[in-house]
Image (tube, rainbow, N blue to C red):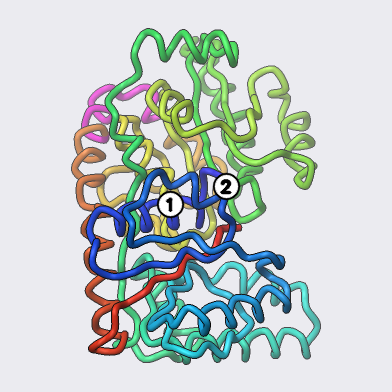
Amino acid sequence: MTEFGIGTYIRNVVRNLGRLDQENNYFLIGSPSRAQEIDALPSNFRTIALTAPEHSIQGFREFRNMVKRLGCDLVHIPNLFSVPRALPCPYVMTVHDMLDHMSRAREQTGFWRSLHFQLTRRVLAGAARIFAVSNFTKTEIEKLFEIPSDRIEVVYNAIDERFLHGHASAADRELIAQRYQVTYPFLLYAGRVSPHKNVVRMIEAFSALKTELERSQAYPDLKLIIIGDDLSGNPDLRRTVIRSCVQNDVRFLGFVPIDVLRIFYDEAKVFVFPSLYEGFGLPPLEAMAHGTPVVTSNVSSLPEVVGSGAVLVNPENVFEIMRALHRVLTDAALRQRLRERGYQQVARFSWEASVRRIVEAYGETGPADARVRNQQPAAD
């Protein structure tokens, strides 16, 4: 399981269900190895292995038959699938964003684009309740698929509790110095490196920032560290680094464990997240939990998530990104304000509060006399 996206959602929802609900019976249908990552669960949770690939026709059939055999009263689908399941009981669904629908639609012919749209609408229309992770995502669902507003409920994400374990210690700093040879000041990006994340413009902004800082001889050894998936499918990033003449100042580290990622968040001078589209956007909140100033985009869900705790920029304007980074690096008073507001903003989001609301919704949507059973398939 990766440390980003739907895997984080499933892990934290199931973990908090285990803490909050010992009455209902839950079946976790999917990969047993992924269920083991969630830690120990109480006796009212059982892991049921799927033998067929999750996204195959065989997988859908096996899943449906398993739900029927187990006598489930309610199913929770934790992310949007486009293939209707024809389940034998009601289901609720979490929608993180509409990006998959939009990006796949651009790659498809007219027939397949229309089919994909209609199947997605059918899945959403059939849900007893839709959980949107932000007001932005709720509005997107309403706009694209004409789902009534009262069928969609905003239930926010929150950061993993491991990001709340305090600041980096001397031993932590020594760990990244020894394991990753990081002994210099750095800007940080953490997340996937797919096109909508806008990493190309971030690298270009960093190159312009280095030029600007040279004029005042500030931060001469500043680096940009990018933590995320591998670059094999994104050759544009390497080309951008070379074209921008920052080969010696940009480092791609791939995935790192949460316990190490929290050290990078804590040590970064600025966390930069210029994404073009986010259904929620956890990484800025994760950085804020460590008191790290954040520069992020003024589009999609990000203003809703970061509030007044970050500097917002037009993500399509390289020089606006650069100027914001320069300002945050060189303005100590601004950095302190962002630190204080960031802590306040993080406190607004809680997995416990969100999962309490999800449990209430299970009771509202499942049969009144049933013991609600929640199903969480493995993440992508």
Quadrant in the rendering for residue 110: bottom right
Q: Position of residue 238 (x, y in %)?
A: 76, 34
Q: Position of residue 328 (x, y in %)?
A: 36, 30
Quadrant in the rendering for residue 241: top right
Q: Residues within 10 Å of mark 1 (few under 14, many from 20)?
A: many
CB contact under 8 Å: marks 2 and 1 = yes
Image point (30%, 22%), residue name: 167
Image point (41%, 59%), residue name: 280
Image point (33%, 62%), residue name: 44
- Residue 99 marker: none
Q: Secondary structure at mark 2?
A: loop
| CA separation in Å, label 2 and label 1 | 10 Å
Q: Position of residue 140 (x, y in %)?
A: 45, 77
Horizontal relation, residue 183 to residue 11: left or right: right
Q: Earlier in the sequence, mark 2 or mark 1?
A: 2
Horizontal relation, residue 238 to residue 67: left or right: right
Residue with the mark numbered 2: 1
Amino acid identity at mark 1: Arg
State the extent of the magenta-drawn residues as a range: 327-338
Q: Secondary structure at mark 1?
A: helix
Q: Is residue 153 above or below residue 175?
A: below
Residue with the mark numbered 1: 11
